Amino acid sequence: MMTPQQVAEKVARIMWPDDHAVRGLGMEIVAVGPGTATLRMSVRQDMVNGHGNCHGAFIFAVADSTFAYVCNSDNHRAVARGVDINFLAPAHGGDILTASGARRQQGERSGIYDIEVTNQQGTLVALFRGRSVRVKGHFFDPA
Amino acid sequence: MMTPQQVAEKVARIMWPDDHAVRGLGMEIVAVGPGTATLRMSVRQDMVNGHGNCHGAFIFAVADSTFAYVCNSDNHRAVARGVDINFLAPAHGGDILTASGARRQQGERSGIYDIEVTNQQGTLVALFRGRSVRVKGHFFDPA
Amino acid sequence: MMTPQQVAEKVARIMWPDDHAVRGLGMEIVAVGPGTATLRMSVRQDMVNGHGNCHGAFIFAVADSTFAYVCNSDNHRAVARGVDINFLAPAHGGDILTASGARRQQGERSGIYDIEVTNQQGTLVALFRGRSVRVKGHFFDPA
Amino acid sequence: MMTPQQVAEKVARIMWPDDHAVRGLGMEIVAVGPGTATLRMSVRQDMVNGHGNCHGAFIFAVADSTFAYVCNSDNHRAVARGVDINFLAPAHGGDILTASGARRQQGERSGIYDIEVTNQQGTLVALFRGRSVRVKGHFFDPA
């Protein structure tokens, strides 16, 4: 019998090789747990405009990827249905963004997850509230 | 004296060379106008996971970039404060996503803009409602 | 065989007697149709604060009630899962608020509905985007 | 020199007599503090439909009122710009709803506040994320 922590880690190990886009953006998994996940991403030069400001989509990307690891961490396959995101401070080329997520509520099908993105100085860059819905299936046989 | 259409086109011509990230994602501007914009992006192989599904952040990206062109189209500099996005259908490698945006309301500082993303079959992929706030400055001297 | 318009009207006639709270707030149904509804509410003195400004919850109320009539108009029972609302102009005692709603997307279970609230001068007071989910059951036998 | 706790309490004492609508809905203030507030409301018979389910607007109302007390607690006048709310469990006639709010981020003008609504059994009824904007003025002379 696996612990919830072991389940979360096993799910992450199964998800990761499939996440080409996440790895292509240079993200790394800092930690996963039952209902939690932390990912990190450096803001590369191809993510910024001419004034050095990071495009909001890449701030979204690190939050959304973290959301995926959190909302799947119990081995029920789930997908994003929607997101409310607030951009609170700009990110710049060279910044290291850390996204930390936690489950707020998980019903039989729908779930709400909060992810916050901070930079290397601890400044809050974005608050992201994700809405997930479970689909059929598991990452591995839960028996 | 420029028409609103000429203003929108001139703003877009000024924004575009600076939008390294937008061009790096392979987007193109289909049309801009006063309070409207349409952008297009093909879903590349580096945007999908191992099952061929596009990462939500790239669907967000084409909507968010369109939002930027719309909310700046009157030559008042504005930035995204937040977004509510609903993902309605998956996108896949090779899909061509079109994001069309329109102004819903623009106050003295804050604005609300609706962007919808469809694929090459006309299927609605995402509904994006952006919240902007004006910052100081213009793209060109409005006199 | 009923037309979609007849279905929407029949659903509304069944919902209305049950909607004690909606009637208690003094709302009236202006029109319903397949995927559309319009409701009206006067801002009463018990809805405003000492400066005559309407509490946001009553602006929400007329939009949310309209949402209910729209998302149930096809005789599939549905409930609100969530809402993103933007308040764009204040409402005052004596104002007559009109909320008009339309379906943006309805999947097998989930739906997205846009409701806008205007006052008697046509000023946009609020933009409301509702997320619904269907539950089991119908208002009347659809056979 | 007042402490932040004293400021929050003084603001609440000034706001309360003006909040006719809040008092008309039978709410009471449980606690206020710097960047926090808790309000309570019983679900009355005029808030429910024929099946005893509370109209979502009244769940919204207790959260939105709490939001107002939180986002004004530092004696800068602020108003709601928008809200993302997720309804997680129904409320019924006779339920006692408690809304607890906390500041997530307050910039020079804009702020983000999280309010959660629970019932008397501790079940999470709604998650509410409010967006505020400061307007000119104070509740009392801050000198």
Image (cartoon, coloured by chain):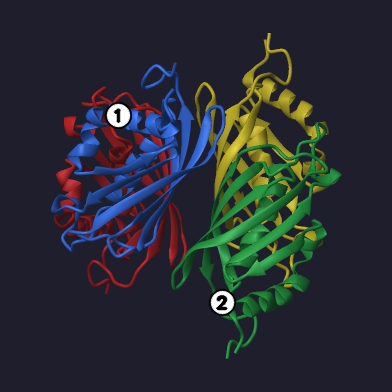
Chain colours: A green, B yellow, C red, D blue
Q: Secondary structure at mark 1?
A: helix
Residue D15 - label: 1
Residue A19 visible (yes or no): yes
User: Viewer-nearest of labels 1 and 2?
Assistant: 1
> Neighbour class for label 1 at 10 Å: few (<14), some, many (≥20)?
some
Q: Quadrant of the C terminus of chain A?
A: bottom right
Q: Identity of the amino acid at label 1? A: Met
Q: Quadrant of the N terminus of chain A?
A: bottom right
Q: Are marks 1 and 2 on the same chain?
A: no
Amino acid carrying label 2: it is: His
Name the residue at 22% across, 59% down: D95
Q: Quadrant of residue C91?
A: top left
Q: Which chain's residue wears label 2?
A: A
- Residue A76 has which mark? 2
Q: Position of residue B64 (x, y in %)?
A: 65, 43
Vertical order, D11 against D91 (above or below): above
Q: Residue furthest front?
A: D1
Please give left or right for residue C48 compared with residue A105 in the image.
left
What label sits on residue C54 in the rendered view? Answer: none
**Residue sitting at 61 percent across and 42 percent down?**
B100
Label 2, secondary structure: give it: loop
